[in-house]
Amino acid sequence: MARPLRMTMMMRIASLLSTPSWKKSIGWRPVQFLKPILLLGDEPRGLYQTFILKPLMLGYGVGRARVDSLLRGGNYYPAAKPGKPGLRPIIIGHLDRRICSSLFVQYHRTALTSFFTQSHPRVIQHAGGLEDGAIRFAKLIQSAMGPQVPVPYIPSEAFDPMVVIGLDCKNAFNSLGALGDGYVLRPGDSISHCASFAAHILPYASQFYQGDCRLFLKQQPRVEAFPCSMGVHQGDPAGLSLFCHALHPFLLRIADKHGSCLFPLYADNITVVGRFSEASAAVKDIVDTLRDDLSLEIQPRDSKIFSASWIGLPPDQQDAIRGFLWARFPHLRSFAIEQEGIVLGGIPVGSTSFIQAWLSAKLTSLDEELRLLGDLPTLQYFLRGIDPFLVLEACSAFDTSVVRELGNAFQWPPHVVRVPGGTLSPMEFASFKRQLPYAEGGDGFTPQAGVALSAYYVATANFLQWSASLPWMRDSNQLYSRESGLLWDSDAPDQPLNPMLRTFLQTSQELIARGVPHYSDLGELDRAKESNAIPLPTFFRIDGGPPFLPPQRAVTAHLMKTFPPHLERKAHLSEHQRG
C-alpha cells in the first residue's frame, strides 16, 4: 500500500460490494463514494488510504462480513447498565458520513486527548479516542476521593464528606443538532494544528451530518432497520468527540468558579469530586448550564452521589445521612444516594460486596445474551479496572459460559464442548486455536481467568504513568511518592492509603513470584516512567503451562466450523509434527 492510490485498485474494492442486494440493505453506491476521494488532495487521500482502504486491500477486511460490520457501525454489544436489557442499538448514517467521522477521530486522537486532559488542571475529560479512558476515569476518581474511612457518627451541620456526584445526560450524543455540529466542525478550531485536516475533510463530510440516520437493532432471526431523527447519534465515531468538544468550554467556566472541586469526565459521564457542600453547588451550575446553553437534560434517577466514608455504616446511620443530605440540599433530592458503591464509566467502585454483586449481575446478563452476539466478547475491560482478586471466580464462570455457548452455536461434538474437568478446557481450546492460520480467525479467545492479574497490573501501571503528568496531580501535590506523605500511612510506611495503589502493589507482589516485570519500589517506577520502559507483562496460563501473549481477535464462523476437525487432526500428529 505504499504505492500511489489507483482507480483500478479502488474499483476492485467497489466491485466486491456492488450487488443490488448490498445497495438495498446498506443504502450506498460504492462508485459514488470512491470517485470523490480521488479528487481530494494528497493528505486527506492518504488518510483514506491508511484507515479505510489499506485494511481492505491487505485481505483481512475484504468480504461482506467485515465491510457489513463497518457500515453498520461495528459489532453488537450487550447493554452495560442493568436498567437497559437487550443489546445496545447502533445508529449510523450515510457511509461517507461514517468514514469521514472515523477519519476525524483517527486524525485528531492525539491532539484531542492532550486538549481534553491538559487544558485545565481540574477538568480532566476523557474523549477523542483516548486509550483506556474509562479505566483512567475510574482510577482518577478513586485517587481523588481518598481512602475508605467510615464516618463513626450521625451527620450534623458540620458533616461535609468527600463525595463523587455523577450526572447522567439524557440522549447526550443524540441531542447535538446541526447548529452544534457546525460549531464544533468548523475548520481552524481551538486545536490549531488540526485545522489542516478540518479544512480538507470536513467541508466534504459536513453534508453527511444533515441527513437522516437509521437504527439497526438485532432481532432474531434478522436485523431490522428503523428511521430515526437527525443530528449526531450513537454509533458515529466522531459523536463522542463532538459532544465533549461542545461541552468543554462551559466546564472550564464552572471549574474556575468552584476551585476546590475536580471534574473528571468520560464520554457523557460527568462527575464532580469534592466536599459535598462545594460539589453540590458545582452540580447545580452544571445542570443549569447544560439546560440553558446546550439544551441537554440530566436524568436525576440515573444520577448518583457516593462517598467512600459511607461504606459499611449501620442502617440507622445510612438513613440519617440520606435524610440530612436531602434536607440540606433539596436540589439533589431526586439523585440516588449510593452508600456501598458506584459504577464509574462501566467500572464498579466501592465495597467488596457491591463489586461482587455487580459482577454477578453482569455475568448473568452476558450469559443470557451471549447467543445473540455476532462476535465473542471478553471481560478484559472490567478486569483492568477491578481488583483482580475479586474477579477470578467470575472470570472462570465467564470462560465456561463462552466455551459452552460456542459449542452449542457451532454444533461441536460433545467431547469438544466439555468445560474444565472434561476433555477440553478453555485454555486447551485457546491453545489449539492459536495454532490456526490468522486468515481463519485464530487467536480470538483468551480465557479471562488467565489474564486478570496482568491486565490489572498493566492498566494501573499505565494510569500511574499517565496521571503523574496531569496538571491537577502536580498542582495539588498528589504525586505518588513517599515524600509527599499524602497517600501513605505514617504508621505503616509500606502501606499506601490509596486503595487503588495498595491493590496495585499487592498485585505486583503476586506477579513477582511468576517472574513478570514489576515495580514494587516507587522510585523504580518513576525511573521507568521517565524512560517509558513499563512493559506489557506476559499473560499466564491457568493450567501452569508456558506463558503467552495472544492478540484479541473476533472468532469467525469459519473458525468455529473448522476447529473440531483441526483438533482431531492435531491429535494424530507426532510431537515433532506438532512442534
Image (cartoon, rainbow, N blue to C red):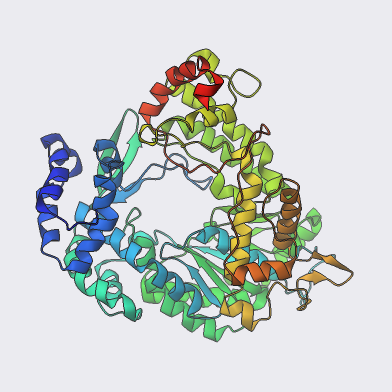
Does residue 164 appear in this view? Answer: no
Q: Is residue 46 left or right of residue 292?
A: left
The residue furthest right is: 491
Q: Is 59 above or below relative to 534?
A: above
Give the left or right position of residue 104, taking residue 313 as reference: left
Image: 228 above or below 540: below
Residue 464: give x, y in percent of width and height. 63, 66
Please tell me which residue lies in front, 394 or 560.
560
Q: Give coordinates of residue 357: x percent, y percent.
A: 66, 43
Residue at left 54%, top 45%? 82
Q: Residue at x 16, y 68 (%)?
A: 41
What x and y, as percent, mark residue 449? 63, 38
Against 219, residue 32 (above or below) is below
Q: Where is residue 8? Give x, y as percent.
A: 10, 48
Residue 538 horizontal side relative to residue 236, left or right? right
Q: Quadrant of residue 426?
A: top right
In front: 142, or 331? Answer: 142
